[in-house]
């Protein structure tokens, strides 16, 4: 096994935590049990230079068939899991291996090695393409989601270092399409009318603590959606600010976001109402900033073309409700309209 991947890069070392921990490429390969035809890459927050001492290194191996427990040395690893997340302890030689946890010697940093078959990842790539094709035709709702683990896999694929099978990994990246994935990440979060209704309902009931909480979270979600348009492929909420800085979000938007994020909103009704309205104004600013980002990408619906599609999809006799939904959803595609705060009566 050690002879399969010998070459100039086998002595490569990945510096983690600013060089406090050094991860040899050889260590990863010795614990990944690669076979001919496998592809593998290493990613995660530590590899990207944004993790901390409690973060893990994430290795993904793509193979024709999963390893069986008998093909690995279970005692060498911190923990081994099967596809149904059962712990394998060396007593089930025919069980498939899904995940291996191994500690870097002398540290508390864990290397997670996850296995997927080519059949799985090809199906995943097809799902991204099909969902994207659906999303650009259906501008009102996008309820075809992906699981968190699949989204993490795709993010790491686009933010990783290849360990084996470079050509195969490049083909997989092209098959998925980073631009497609960024658009889906945006659409899964942007302009959610049902959330606006929740905020409005709490406002009308005078339940200002709940209203403030919902409005603040909506602001966070919409700002994260905007970072996806700017190039962020990480779905995790915890890295929003980091990727906003990394992907070149406009400084004025970032500063306003941080200002509102760090503001408590106050404990009296007047200050809470003011805070809610401020978050709505900021979300309107995000929508306005999104339009040129959408327009600059080939294949992304935007502007009047997108708004015409929304009009067609939401033709209804529902009166004010329908008009409010149409107006709100159009904001994400370049139609400014009236301020969202105008829906909220004092």
Image (cartoon, rainbow, N blue to C red):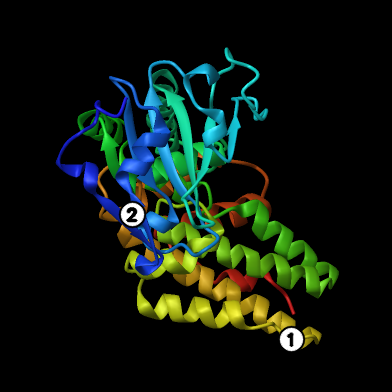
Query: How far across and how far down the image is residue 25, in percent?
Result: 31, 45
The quarter holding residue 117 reads top left
Q: Position of residue 121 (x, y in %)?
A: 41, 26
Kind of element beneath mark 1: loop
Which label was assigned to residue 294? 2
Q: Is residue 142 visible?
A: no
The residue drawn where x is 33% and y is 54% is 294
Q: Position of residue 228 (x, y in %)?
A: 41, 55
Q: Is 139 in front, or is 74?
A: 74
Which residue is at 41% across, 18% downward?
119
Instruction: Residue at the far left: name it.
Output: 8
Closer-to-camera residue (135/150): 150
Placement of 122 over or under 94, stated as above or below: below
> Counting other residues with Cα less than 10 Å from the Cα at mark 1, is it few (<14), some (14-19), or many (20 or more)?
some
Image mark for residue 266? 1
Check the image and name the residue furthest to the top.
94
Q: Earlier in the sequence, mark 1 or mark 2?
A: 1
> x and y percent of residue 275 in the render?
66, 81
Q: Nearer the viewer, residue 26 or 237?
A: 26
- In the displayed structure, would residue 283 be above or below residue 328? below
Q: Is residue 253 above or below residue 94?
A: below
Mark nearest the camera among 1 and 2 is 1
């Amino acid at each position: 096994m050690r002879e399969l991947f010998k070459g100039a890069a086998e002595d490569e070392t990945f510096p983690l935590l600013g060089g406090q921990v050094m991860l040899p490429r050889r260590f990863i390969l010795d614990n990944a049990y690669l076979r001919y035809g496998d592809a593998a890459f290493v990613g995660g927050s530590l590899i990207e230079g944004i993790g901390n001492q409690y973060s893990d290194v994430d290795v993904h191996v793509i193979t024709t068939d999963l390893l069986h427990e008998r093909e690995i040395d279970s005692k060498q690893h911190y923990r081994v899991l099967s596809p149904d997340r059962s712990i394998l302890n060396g007593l089930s030689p025919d069980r498939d291996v899904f995940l291996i946890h191994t500690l870097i010697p002398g540290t508390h940093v864990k290397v997670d090695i996850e296995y997927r078959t080519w059949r799985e990842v090809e199906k995943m790539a097809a799902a991204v393409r099909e969902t994207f094709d659906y999303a650009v035709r259906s501008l009102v709702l996008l309820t075809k989601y992906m699981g968190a683990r699949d989204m993490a896999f795709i993010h790491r694929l686009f933010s990783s270092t290849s360990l084996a099978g470079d050509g195969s990994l490049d083909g997989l990246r092209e098959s998925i399409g980073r631009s497609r994935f960024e658009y889906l990440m945006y659409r899964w979060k942007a302009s959610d009318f049902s959330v606006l209704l929740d905020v409005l309902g709490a406002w009308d009931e005078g339940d200002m603590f709940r209203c403030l909480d919902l409005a603040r979270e909506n602001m966070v979600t919409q700002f994260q959606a905007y970072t996806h348009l700017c190039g962020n492929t990480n779905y995790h909420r915890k890295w929003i600010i980091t990727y906003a800085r990394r992907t070149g979000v406009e400084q004025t938007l970032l500063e306003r976001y941080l200002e509102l994020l760090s503001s408590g909103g106050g404990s009296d009704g007047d200050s809470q109402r003011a805070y809610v309205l401020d978050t709505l104004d900021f979300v309107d600013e995000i929508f306005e900033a999104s339009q040129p980002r959408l327009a600059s990408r080939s294949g992304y619906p935007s502007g009047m073309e997108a708004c015409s599609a929304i009009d067609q999809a939401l033709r209804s006799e529902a009166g004010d409700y329908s008009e409010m939904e149409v107006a709100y959803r159009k904001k994400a595609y370049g139609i400014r309209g009236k301020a969202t705060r105008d829906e909220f009566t004092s």
